[in-house]
Image (tube, coloured by chain):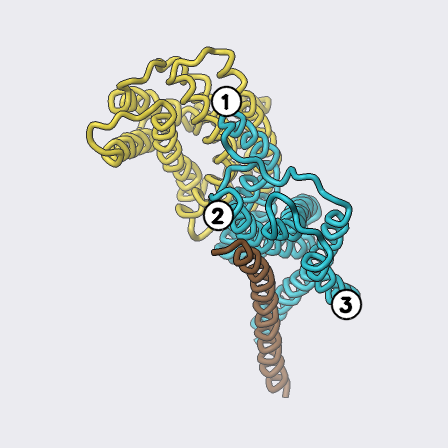
Chain colours: A brown, B yellow, C cyan
Amino acid sequence: MTSQTFVVLAYMAIWAGLAAYVVGLARRQHRLARRIEALAERIRPGEG
Amino acid sequence: MGGAARAAYLLRKDLRIELRKKESVAAMTFFGVLVLVILNVAQGPGRQADPETAAGVLWVAVIFSAVLGLGRVFARERENGCISALLASPMAPGSIFVAKALVNLTLMVLSQLVLVPVFFALFGQGLSGGALGLVPSLLLVDAGFSAAGTLLSAVSAGTRRNEVLLPILLFPLVLPLVALAVKATGAALAGRPAPELAGLLEPLAAFVLIYATAGYLLFPSVIREG
Amino acid sequence: MTLRRSAILPALSAVLVPAAVAMVFFYAPLERTMGVVQKIFYFHLPLAGVAFLSFLVACVSGILYLVRRERRWDAWGAAAVELGVVLTTLVLVTGSLWGRPIWNTWWTWDPRLTTSLILWFIYTACLILRSAVEDEGRRATYCAVVAVAGFVDVPIVFLSARLFRSIHPTVIRSDSVGLEPAMIWTLLVCAAAVLVLWAGLLGLRRSLHLQEAALSDLRALAERAR
């Protein structure tokens, strides 16, 4: 492995790592939105 | 009763319980000896460990056996619902911390009275330093380990995964303690002069001071969560 | 609880990050001794600094929570711990990838890397602890205590790692190479990019935490209203 490979790997690791985290956050946000919807559904029909 | 007197009272009560039943001390010591034996076997037959490697072995046995004792300290209190009783008493939470930490310290010292001779029996060939040089670092690490360990065992006792969580939380914190202790002990076992050892002990003392203080300040918040 | 979503931080990130990367590869001169591998340093160092900052925020938030017992401090703390762990992971990975071609080793007990490693263990343990506690108040208290106790360890870790090294003079020194002005500018832009990125993600994570907590509240209310 040449020196260039290490640099490339390092930068790829940085952006992949950060991107993975951001994607994780986004998915969690979506799950939250779905749960809010579900809760709203439960409350709305119940109050007729 | 003043704060110190109350702490002393709690300390005596706990020690009486621990020493009468001997379950914690016995388990700790037994486990420590087991670890020493396993590591002796693991290093291969007929091999002689150099002073620093031997020091490392001793400290692995010490901290693994100590974590076992720590885990029991609050587990027993929770089982009997004693925590609420302690909180209802006029005893300051800080004094409870001091008492518990001293109990742990005593248990560690007692188990080491057995572990150190066993260690020398298994790993002692070729080591020039005697057991006496180990005493300062042992005491300092025991104190530091007890201070941080008492605080964190109160935290882990309040969780679902108590036994697993305590080493996970405690070991990273005490890593510098162990590293320095290995250096100091290794030097002692190699027969190095005293002034050299003293310099290595200063950060250990700093650790003890910092965690005694931090533990005293943070413990009340933890214990009030029940 | 208003959740202002200002677009400043994301916009700044979108500008700074590409600018920083461009500067690293097209503006900064090639370093004499280490060659192109040295370019890892431009992000490795800011990542380490901002990770440390994140843990400092976690520690301060922890103290504020223990004193004020307000949910928002737990939100900042939880976000800061998580981001700190993510960034520290990147620090360790980039540090390893930097060290390997230069000093032919994947790891070195350099004080800063050692501190990063221990911090990674401490705060990952903190995250595991969070997942093991159901009750919000207790979880927040425990996390705060661990965040503070963990951060307090930092000076000791650093000191002991330095002591460790002074006894092993063969351990390699890291980035003490002189920096030309162009390099310093590149470093500053990279630092700004990482800082802005961190601040943005911190705010996002914190608001996610608050939203999830609010949802739990609503659910509890809905259950009781049945």
Quarter of the picture holding the C terminus of chain C: bottom right
- Which residue is tagged 2? B158
- Which residue is tagged 1? B8
* Element type where label 2 sits in the image: loop
Q: On the image, which quarter does residue A38 sit in?
A: bottom right
Q: CA distance from mark 2 to mark 1?
A: 25 Å
Give percent across and percent down for residue C210: 66, 63
User: Mark 2 or mark 1: which is in front?
Assistant: 2
In screen coordinates, is B181 left or right of C33? Answer: left
Q: Amino acid at mark 2?
A: Gly
Give percent across and percent down for residue B221: 60, 42
Q: Amino acid at mark 3?
A: Ala
Q: How many marks?
A: 3
**Residue furthest out toward the front:** C32
Give percent across and percent down for residue C125: 50, 49
User: Mark 1 or mark 3: which is in front?
Assistant: 3
Q: Are marks 2 and 1 in contact (CB under 8 Å)?
A: no
- Which residue is tagged 3? C11
Q: Which badge, 2 or 1, comes first in the chain's sequence?
A: 1
**Residue furthest out toward the bottom:** A48
- Looking at the picture, do discs 1 and 3 lie on one chain? no
